[in-house]
Image (cartoon, rainbow, N blue to C red):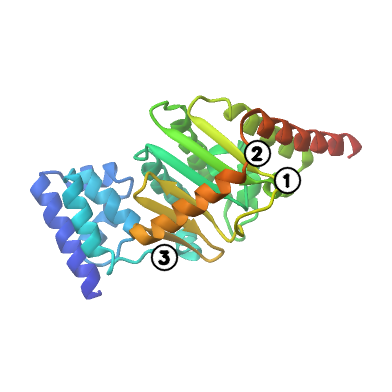
Amino acid sequence: MSAAAEDIGKALRALRHASGLTGEAVARRASMSPGKLSKIEHGKVLPSVVDVDLILTAVGISHEAKERFLEQARAAVTEETAWRLIHRTGLWKHQQAIQAIEERTSEFRLFQGQLIPGLLQTSEYASAVFDLLPDLSEEARTRAIAARLARQQVLYDCGRSFHFLICEHVLQWRICDPAIMAVQLDRLVSLSRLPNVVLGLLPLHARMPDFPMTCFSLHDNRLAIVETFHSEITTRDPKDLRIYLETFDRFAAVAVHGEEMRVAVEEIRDGFLRQREIV
């Protein structure tokens, strides 16, 4: 047990007791198991920044108090979680944790240079994504796909806004059969017509302002989640957030949107349809 984990656990437990809520109630609100919350409160597990944020939101402390607590805690709280640890605890649980964050986000922005964003994936495409992961059992795969698709309900909440930026090469990156890719691209076109969804395409012919080093999501102006090959990194540092916000804006400035974007996506889709006919 580390001193940092013990101190954070005691503080979170005290806040929960002050709220009058039971551990089960807070765990349910924070989209985690009562067992995990208990381990955090007793210093047996050092929580991530996301865990701390979800618990603080669940106990209902004021925004100002939460920000002060997070500012004090973030130096001790790990902000990088290896994918192997996420796989070990369950990808579907991780999807539920991300869902809880998305449901608390009013303005969502995502830059993606690797895959179709999870919020926009068809079930067949999501299945192909999880097929790429080694040593994933059929049960774990099924639960992860279901949890990912459940996240997509948030798109239909018109009180929230979504802005996706996707590199064109992502749409041509073959991780599944041409027919599945064609259906997936049709879904992008369809979702882009939702009143609260903006989809930008970064065309191959455009001069780019930066490299697509990682994919990242921005949740309002308070949180960034960055994915690398080995880990997921969460940051609330204002300086880090400024970097990602500015990077997003630079890419957005050269992306195509609206009808121009839809025409480009449909052309790529038609290419997959021709491949299907050949096959």
Q: Earlier in the sequence, mark 2 or mark 1?
A: 2
x%, y% of residue 250?
54, 50
Relative to 48, say whether 220 is above or below. above
Is 208 or 21 nearer to us in this picture?
A: 208
The kind of residue tagged 1 is Cys
Q: CA distance from mark 1 to mark 3?
A: 30 Å
The kind of residue tagged 3 is Glu
Q: Is residue 90 visible?
A: no
Q: CA distance from mark 3 to mark 2?
A: 30 Å
x%, y% of residue 173?
72, 49
Relative to 3, say whether 243 is above or below. above
Query: Disc 1 or disc 3, which is closer to the eye?
Result: 3
Figure label count? 3
Q: In the rendered structure, are the residues bearing label 3 and label 2 in contact, judged by CB atoms less than 8 Å apart?
A: no
Residue 176, labelled with which disc? 1
Q: In the rendered structure, are the residues bearing label 2 and label 1 in contact, judged by CB atoms less than 8 Å apart?
A: yes
Q: Give residue 159's quadrant in the image.
A: top left
Residue 80, labelled with which disc? 3
The kind of residue tagged 2 is Glu
Q: Residues within 10 Å of mark 1 (few under 14, many from 20)?
A: some
Is 84 or 156 nearer to us in this picture?
A: 156
Which residue, as the protein is rendered here, is positioned at the far bottom? 2
Q: Give residue 122's quadrant in the image.
A: top right
Residue that appears at 24% across and 68% down: 5
In the shown orientation, is residue 31 left or right of residue 89?
left
What residue is disc 2 on? 124
Q: Secondary structure at mark 3?
A: strand
Query: Disc 3 or disc 2, which is closer to the eye?
Result: 3
